[in-house]
Image (spheres, helix red, strand yellow):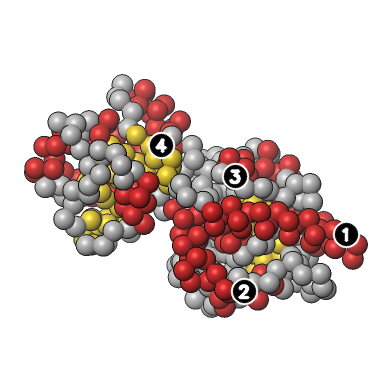
Amino acid sequence: MTVLNNSLPIIDTYDSKRPSIAFSGNFTLGVHSLLKEYFNQKFNFWYCLFSCHNSFEIYKLTDLIEKDILYQIYNKEAFIVLDNSLEPFTRSIDSIYKNIVIKEKIPASQIILMTNMYDAKEYSDNLARNLNQESIKIFWFNVFEKDLQDAIKHIYRDNVPKTLENKPYPKKFLNFNRRWRLHRPFLITLFYGKNLLDNGHISFGPCDQEDNWTKKWKEMLDYFSNDVDTIELLKKNENVKNINSLFLDSTDLHINKAQCTIDTNRYYEETYFSVVSETTFFTKNFYPNSRFLSEKTFKPIAMKHPFILVSVPKSLAILKEMGYKTFSPIIDESYDDETNDSKRMTMIVNEIERLCCLNENELEHFLTQAKEICNYNYENLMLKKKFIIEL
């Protein structure tokens, strides 16, 4: 296996008004993992890391590839590897077919998409059929799982927090939030309505310019416009918009802390479960809705902390397929089967409330059972060797 690039293009078009391409001489984690896991295959490839669906509308991919390599790709002697494993955007798959397969006539059979979207293969195959095209290849790359394993092995192994000790817990749960994806202000609103904000170590404050209660409140009302009960619930708790910003380890929530850091250890030690606000949650309209496990899920696994997963339905099922155990029956995980977004969030918050109210004996039982599962999951993370699977 050989990487054909002299330098690796990294396309950033998150802000379409200020797009950029950086060229790196260093291999990304995706390239390192491909070379390690497929080292014995005749699998020569040209590699590009890209940000989102408009990357190949703003930049013409064939302008970035050397002519001799492009000739090998057209003649099916080499592959293009497009790495979008950091994001859950199915629209990126649409863009690959539209801008690369159809416009540039690159054979779909020679394109590999590296993604962390578990349902990308089904989406891609359906799209290919509708477009009367061959299917591109989909490699599911658990980039965040690999990243957390590396961090624990090489940086933090001796600094994993001492969690789940049998002791009083003034704070019950830990909930990190950065960007105001719509389910996060919705979650905070339900916390407010049940007086749970004081029960947790919670971060929720100014992030991107458009992240504010005025904008997101209107967005929530629009999303639930046909759900009378949820609209009433929101209106009942509208004073949540007056709460102070919530900060933990940092007041700068613009920075994406994808790694575990030692200065967060105490928050894991001072609580007995995490509420993981994943990247995707809502299942309707234009919201990214693929099952997608980011560093947010693997941090509590690395920190030996039980968790409730605030995500799209059937996300816990992915973890089980990856060899992890989840926390049923000590945590009611029936929320993972609920497809109605409002009901799923309500079930999640009700379970958080129940866990916050455990008496002394119930808490001791919870800590004992959770510790066994957390230790198992930690070992599963540390022993994992394969992080790329062709779907």
User: Secondary structure beneath disc 2?
Assistant: helix
User: Which numbered disc, 1 or 3, marks the residue closer to the eye?
Assistant: 3
Q: Which residue is depicted at the point 58% across and 40% down? A: 321
Is the residue marked by circle 4 packed among few (<14), some (14-19), or many (20+) residues within 10 Å? Answer: few
Q: Which residue is mark 1?
A: 362
Cα distance between the residues tagged 2 and 4? 35 Å
Q: Position of residue 267 (x, y in %)?
A: 66, 73
Choose top left, top right, bottom left or bottom right for residue 104. top left
As drawn, the label of residue 390 is 4
Q: Position of residue 52 (x, y in %)?
A: 35, 50
Is the residue marked by circle 2 packed among few (<14), some (14-19), or many (20+) residues within 10 Å? Answer: some
Is the residue marked by circle 3 packed among few (<14), some (14-19), or many (20+) residues within 10 Å? Answer: few
Q: Which residue is mark 2?
A: 265
Q: Position of residue 170 (x, y in %)?
A: 79, 74
Name the residue type under label 2: Asn
Name the residue type under label 4: Glu
Q: Are marks 1 and 3 in contact (CB under 8 Å)?
A: no
User: Secondary structure beneath disc 1?
Assistant: helix
Q: Position of residue 328 (x, y in %)?
A: 75, 46
Q: Is residue 85 above or below residue 371?
A: above
Is any part of residue 354 visible from this angle?
A: yes
Cα distance between the residues tagged 1 and 2? 25 Å
User: Secondary structure beneath disc 3?
Assistant: loop
Q: Are marks 3 and 2 in contact (CB under 8 Å)?
A: no
Q: Which residue is mark 3?
A: 323
